[in-house]
Image (cartoon, helix red, strand yellow):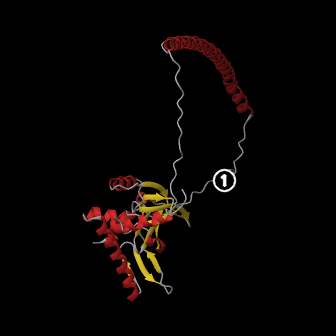
């Protein structure tokens, strides 16, 4: 079972893929930029967070179970075996490589160090290369000296004669435009007054018709109706929650709730945790002792990976 391949395929569609027992692969989007005369398209960088190894959102296990046609529990066990194998290998070797993801090594503090491959995880900009941007020179005004042109007296007289009719033409044209504008303005005001008067008449007719219908309807009411008072109690949750799953995709929440409710649990959705995962709980309790007792029962009979989440909702 090539688990690293399933991790890779999920990273193209999700910002975080958690590998239970190992950590979480997280992609971060980087905007396009212009640097040193080159345009760099947007991309997603891959990082690794070892602290997410204790989390479990079901994304990877569900994906493996669906593609390998195995149960969810078997997929979870395969992931744990995969994580343990990597850590055991790093105890003996200084470096381990996961194809298309990157290199792992253990530092002196026995912490995982990850160096990602140069892979572009942003599908929208996949395959776009960087390219050089040519600079465009904008000519400055008055960069070239204009040569003076000598105009003779005869040329001046001819220019004035040619310019005179054009000036008169624009004068009459301007008068015509102003006249048309005034006529249009007056006509528009008259039209608006007619429309306003028509609307007032129609509104009055509608009001009279509504009053008539109300009177006709009131005639058939023999007894006054009693006011109905309903007391709505605020919905409260307990402080102690038994978590059955945390999901990156919101649609998986409803599926999990339906599954647990069919098994007889008071399952519900309690929101997102600090990692942005949607949490589904088997039940919530006000009393811690009752919550721990129920958690022990669920772990032994239903889900060994269930845990207790304490938060006031």
Residue 174 x/y as whole percent = 67, 21
Residue 196 x/y as whole percent = 61, 15
Residue 94 x/y as whole percent = 41, 87
Determine if residue 281 is in view: no
Question: Which residue is drawn at the image coordinates 69% and 27% (left, top)?
Answer: 163
Q: How many marks?
A: 1
| Residue occupying the far bottom of the picture | 92
Residue 248 x/y as whole percent = 42, 59
Question: Which corner quadrant holds the C terminus?
Answer: bottom right
Q: Is residue 158 above or below residue 202?
A: below
Q: Judge by depth and name the residue closer to the eye, 305 or 150.
A: 305
Q: Is residue 243 above or below residue 207?
A: below
Determine if residue 160 is in view: yes
Q: Judge by depth and name the residue closer to the eye, 79 or 263.
A: 263
Q: Which residue is mark 1?
A: 140
SS for tag 1? loop
30 lies left or right of 4:
right
Q: Is residue 63 above or below residue 161?
A: below
29 lies left or right of 261:
right
Question: Which residue is drawn at the image coordinates 45% and 77% (left, top)?
Answer: 114
Question: Which residue is drawn at the image coordinates 34% and 80% (left, top)?
Answer: 85
Residue 168 in which image quadrant: top right
Question: Which corner quadrant holds the N terminus?
Answer: bottom left
Q: Judge by depth and name the residue closer to the eye, 171 or 279.
A: 279
Q: Judge by depth and name the residue closer to the eye, 99 or 68.
A: 68
| Residue occupying the far right of the picture | 153
Rate crowding at label 1 as few (under 14), some (14 to 19) or many (20 or more) other CA atoms within 10 Å.
few
């Amino acid at each position: 079972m090539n688990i690293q391949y399933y991790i890779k395929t999920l990273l193209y569609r999700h910002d975080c893929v958690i590998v239970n027992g190992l950590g979480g692969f997280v992609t971060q989007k980087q905007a396009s930029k212009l640097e040193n005369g080159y345009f760099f398209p947007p991309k997603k960088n891959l990082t690794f967070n070892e602290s997410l190894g204790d989390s479990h959102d079901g994304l990877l296990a569900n994906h493996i179970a669906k593609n390998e046609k195995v149960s969810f529990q078997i997929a979870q066990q395969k992931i744990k075996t995969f994580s343990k194998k990597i850590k055991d290998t790093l105890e003996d070797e200084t470096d381990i490589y996961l194809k298309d993801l990157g290199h792992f090594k253990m530092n002196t503090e026995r912490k995982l160090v990850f160096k990602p491959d140069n892979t572009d995880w942003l599908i929208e900009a996949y395959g776009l290369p960087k390219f050089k941007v040519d600079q465009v020179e904008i000519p400055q005004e008055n960069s070239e000296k204009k040569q003076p042109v000598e105009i003779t007296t005869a040329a001046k007289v001819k220019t004035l004669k040619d310019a005179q009719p054009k000036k008169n033409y624009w004068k009459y044209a301007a008068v015509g435009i102003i006249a048309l504008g005034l006529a249009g303005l007056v006509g528009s005001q008259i039209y608006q007054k007619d429309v306003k008067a028509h609307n007032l008449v129609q509104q009055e007719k509608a009001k009279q018709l509504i009053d008539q219908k109300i009177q006709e309807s009131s005639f058939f009411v023999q007894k006054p109706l009693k006011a109905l008072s309903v007391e709505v109690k605020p919905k409260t949750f307990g402080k102690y929650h038994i978590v059955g799953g945390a999901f990156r995709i919101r649609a998986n929440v409803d599926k999990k709730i339906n599954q647990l409710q069919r098994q007889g649990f008071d399952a519900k959705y309690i929101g997102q945790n600090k990692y942005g995962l949607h949490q589904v709980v088997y039940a919530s309790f006000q009393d811690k002792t009752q919550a721990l007792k129920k958690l022990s029962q669920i772990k032994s009979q239903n889900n060994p990976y269930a845990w207790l989440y304490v938060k006031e909702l």
